[in-house]
Amino acid sequence: MARIGVFICHCGENISATVDCAKVAEVTANIPGVAVSVDYKYMCSDPGQNMIKEYIEKEKLTGVVVAACSPRMHEPTFRRACGEAGLNPFLCEMANLREHCSWVHDKNEATTNKAIDIVRTLVEKVKRNEPLMPIKVPVTKTALVIGGGVAGIQSALDIANCGHKVIMVEKDPSIGGHMSQLSETFPTLDCSQCILTPRMVEVAQHPNITLYTYAEVESLDGFIGNFKVKIRKKAKSLDEKLCTGCGLCTTKCPAKKIPSEFDQGLSNRTAIYVPFPQAVPNKPVIDKEHCTYYIKGKCKVCEIVCPTKAIRFDQEDEIIEVEVGALVLATGFDIKRANFFPEYGYGKYKDLIDGLQFERIASASGPTLGEIRRPSDGQIPKKIVFLACAGSRDPAKGIEYCSKICCMYTAKHAILYKHKVHDGTAYIFYMDIRAAGKNYDEFTRRAIEEDGAKYIRGRVSRIYERDGKLIVVGADTLMNAKTVEIEADMVVLATAGVASPGAEELAQKLHVSYDQHKFFAEAHPKLRPVETNTAGIFLAGACQNVKDIPESVAQASGAAVKVCGLFSNDELTRDPSVAVVNRTAPPLFSTCVGCFLCQSVCPYQAIEKEEIKSRDGKILKTVAFINPSVCQGCGTCVALCRSKSIDILGYTHKQVYAEVDALLNTL
Amino acid sequence: MDKLRQKAKELLSNNEVQIVVGYEEGTAGKARPAFISSPDQADALIYDERCIHNLAVYLTQHKLSGNTKIAIIASFPVMKSIITLASEKQLDENFIKVIGISKDNNIIEFKDFADIERYINQQDLTFTPEELALIEKIDAMSMEERWEYWQNEFSRCFKCYACRSACPMCYCTLCITDFNQPQWVSVPSHKQGNFEWHINRAMHLAGRCIGCDECSRACPLDLPINLLTKKLSMDIQKQFGYSAGQSLTEPYALSTYKPDDKETFIR
Amino acid sequence: MKLGFYPGCSLEGMSREYSDSVVALAKRFDIELVQIPDWNCCGATAAHNLNKELSLSLPARNLALAEKEGFTDVVVPCAACYSRFSTTHHELMHNHDLRHKINEVMEMEYKGTINTLNVIQFIDKYIIDKIEEKIVKKFNYKAACYYGCLLVRPNNILGFDRAEDPQTMDVVMRKIGADSIDWAFKTECCGAGLSVSATNTVARLSGKIVDDAEHRGAEVIIVACPMCHSNLDMRRSEINKYLGKKVTTPILYITQALGLAVGISEKELGFKRHFVPVNLPIKAETIQKEEVKTKKVEVE
Amino acid sequence: MNEFEPKVVAFVCNWCTYAGADLTGTSRIKYAPNVKIIRFPCTGRIDFMLILKAFAKGADGIIISGCHPNDCHYTSGNFHAKRRWMVFRTMLDFLGVDVNRITFSWVSAAEGARWAEIVNTTVDGIRMLGPYDNYRKMVNQETEVNNG
């Protein structure tokens, strides 16, 4: 006879405000098989957990239902508690009274009744729970870092310095990411590349780090501690061992009119190119789309001039497979471009640029060698207008969130501009100045007070070009919304930061969840900000949401610690709710008739053939066998099996059937 | 017919097979399945339009399968059944000799199952106008009418499970109707029990039914239950371009998917 | 073909030429615009500043009447009316309680089967495909298409064209031979309802519009809203005062421009009712209808 | 005469819709209490018989919801489920079962508001359809064995 303990949590007021917990306890106490039913203010607190433990011992409980928050929140907590009290953790289930009841319904009888039904359902389930033993699996102590921006670099170095192997995959020809494009960095105005490039070199030279640039993740299989990753190494058309990076080819290449990605289209590059002088690795790749040879079938100038004969036109993409125990996603972000703004001319005005383009213009290594000159005619702009919040915090644009970095870099831009164009005027349209961060507000004050940037609190309704000037029409909300019109020589939009283009596709390949803006979703907004919902995959930097450099680096180190923590075990214990094929007495042995239609539904190829033999080795029957260390417990085979020969531990036929029964019997 | 008997005789006499499964004269002018184990019985074998039972059903019965080699007289539906059973790993090619009978009653020698597969795919596999008409008749009804129609039909069922025994694809050694933990299908043959049983039967045969109609023929109450599986076969063929009993290798319609499967109802 | 037609106050009053030109144009394409019987004020800008129910009930009644007449498409040339009709439809379709309430108020039921068309949509749907064969005189002028505010906003409700840089009118104009210019004031505010109460504001706002159009060499400004028209046309003297120069660029309703192209007389189109005289420079290249026809035949 | 309150059971997958419903809670979005959720690892696990059982036990409506295509935590469970539902739905419809009482949907972990919307529209829909008397009648009738 089952002896179930029901423990109803008030969660402070969160549940008790709308659900009459005392009544729930009173009613559920009478459910057959329930030995005890009590309610308490905070079940997850120590006293709460101890109460459960005491009852388990005192009442000799055979099962526990904790009616509290979502199992996705506290199931591990309470199962651990039960385990400590000598009850198999898997005999503990949670009834979700908070997220699925008290928080979504008003205070009334219906809500309390629903709570009772939910508890009853779980009681009936627990009655049929079986003790389960966790499955042990080994850990591959190699990490895969996807993305070679500052976050990826930091994670990789931290993990590698803890003595673990790291594989870094970067889709571009060089690591460095957006940070390598920046001129100076706030709030200290130190040169971005000067602080980044040493780290880039360190990655390339670190004995524990294998770097694959111009490569992308093709697919991911397996599970935490035991991932199998296919990586596509895109053909560089180059033998890297032979190439010395002398760069002769790039000077001789005839295809010279290709807009440079690194310079945001403000300068041109050749078809065989190194994205920027400090690139790591500092060896060229051939951009097949634009290479004359790949298009027309003749040219091969680079091959002719190459002193080491390193060019390989016949090189093809290579797919390599690696085994890793954990992944760090550091794929970064992207920004909206001027063409996203119809009211600002759909990007048809040359002198209306975005923040990254301004970084390149302001950068000493940029197309203007650091002189602030406007793209259209190379003139030095005497009047420049910056727009903070271009797209951000604008539901009409589908971007409700704050891009967070714009306030700071706009202030930086204004300062850089004033330092280079002393007689120029910089206007900044803004909504609010959000400068929360160490020495951040001081920085924006400096822009205003020392460098005289003219901050106008208001938004810009339209920008149009007239006689070579950009007319910026906005409002000054601090001058009772008076219309402001500025005839600017150049306009810089601090465009919204958005998820990087491939983010959704990658998320789907890796089965990590992502939010409506395609940023990767953390497992818990506050308590698990670097984990994803998929065990063993962690987040670093702006792929989660737009972050500035210090934040990205901090999170990157956080992710690194998570990985190292994982690698500190030789074995992992896995959730034992996996599918099993039943066994019955001879001559049946199993109700499985061995049609093996289940084999092709299994996403993990976990289903094998098993031959049941007699003592003399004669094959009596061939049935399906599900490899528990491969099975992930989706249960797709369970629902397919006609003879119901497969069952999934933790969600058995008996259990779910009983749940349906209990749920409706009383409705 | 003599050719057939001749063939059976030689197979048995040179011990190529131990049993020939075919048809013989039954009572009341009906034909019935015959299990011939010696050459001298072979003359009992007949084959004519009355020989309609789907003999494939016997191939999965433990009494027969095992070490005995069987020769089976295979009409077109039987051939399709064999292909499906084989694709579901229920038949051992080395123990089964298939003597096909073409539509115009000629004997076809099959080397192996692949041979049968080839033959089947040369035949006309489309649904007959009659079949389509039957389904359309019900599709044309209103929801309420359909409900009433089937409730009526099912109310007559008394769960003799003849449909199950007659179907070659119903070879589970323990049918879910025999479970009571949990009780998937309520035992008594009241409307609910019958309803649940027939849905189960149809769903378990979805995409596996080869359309021999043996189920409704076997039914002592002539319930048109063959329409359930037929409807699904048509639907599955339309939706996923798959039909049972035509391929040894193609994966089962419901254990595979295409990401772009077109549905209209998911929100 | 018969379509529902809601003129509204302006088209009955100061913008009769708009009404005339719409009807005349439709007629030229064998479309009869039938006025919604017993139609009432749409509430325009006044109502929704005072009382939401009222601002919805007024257009709702017109919609219900149109529905009762069995119309599906109703042509509403005035941008303000169009906006109120569309907003009302949207609100009622997305809020059942409100719908019931309004239905009770007006003691009629609006089911929501009416599809409100502004003039551009009307042209786009019923006329544009057939227009080539009917053109007798190319409208070959540099034209600035001015959409104003209510034709394209609020975009999420109207779902018509691009809110910031609409194109439909330009496409139509090009069809009849015009060179529609790219300019900055397509959807800027003309001053609208302030026409009477704050003339100087209107002069400033409309002034900028007219000025930019002229600056970019427009020979004519094309509008599809009586309010825009009266501000740009009727207030021209104030505008010129504000600009400190004499801008003579005429303002035409898109239906007038199309009317000209298909050979409807200036009289019929009511040019004489404009304040800024419409004397478009005579440009050659007049095609005979027949020619067009024969050309067509050759093609086929 | 008290108003009819639909009984709706929701079979949802643990990774998307269950999490989505959690988000509905954390965002304090209210919805009809008529729905009660049963959690499955994946929509691929949901057995069609459970739908019949739910009806048999007195449900007036059913919601089945999981991850959007390509978002399945197990890569393809939802795709397999989709095919099954397509076939099962045809079956039910052919038998005259009211398929409008079953809502199939994809609700991701990020779509808390959407979950509330799905629940409310479903409950409203069922409220309009009324209690599922046909099925109830079938279940409640006396056992009658008819000898042809």
Image (cartoon, rainbow, N blue to C red):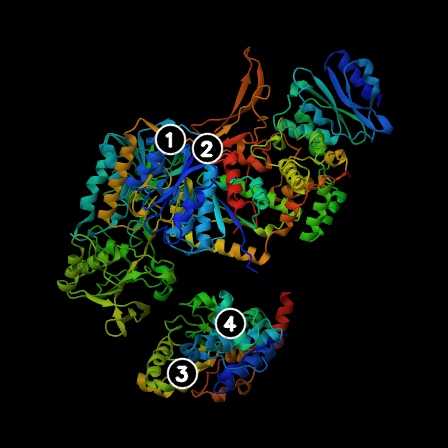
Q: Name the residue under label 1.
A: A87
Q: Is residue C88 above or below residue A309?
A: below
Label count reads 4
N-term mark: 2 or 1? 2
**Considering depth in this image, is A62 or C278 the residue closer to the camera?**
A62
Looking at numbered disc 2 in the image, what kind of residue is underneath it?
Answer: Ala
- Residue C101 is marked as 4
Q: Is residue D26 left or right of residue B176?
A: left
| Residue A188 image position (x, y, % from top left) | 15, 52
Looking at numbered disc 4 in the image, what kind of residue is underneath it?
Answer: Lys
Q: Mark 2 points at which residue?
A: A2
Instruction: Tell me the CA gap for discs 2 and 1.
Output: 13 Å
**Considering depth in this image, is C44 or A4 the residue closer to the camera?**
A4
Disc 1 is placed on an element classified as: loop
Q: Are marks 3 and 4 in contact (CB under 8 Å)?
A: no
Instruction: Tell me the CA gap for discs 3 and 4.
Output: 37 Å
Residue B71 falls in image quadrant: top right
- Residue C287 is marked as none
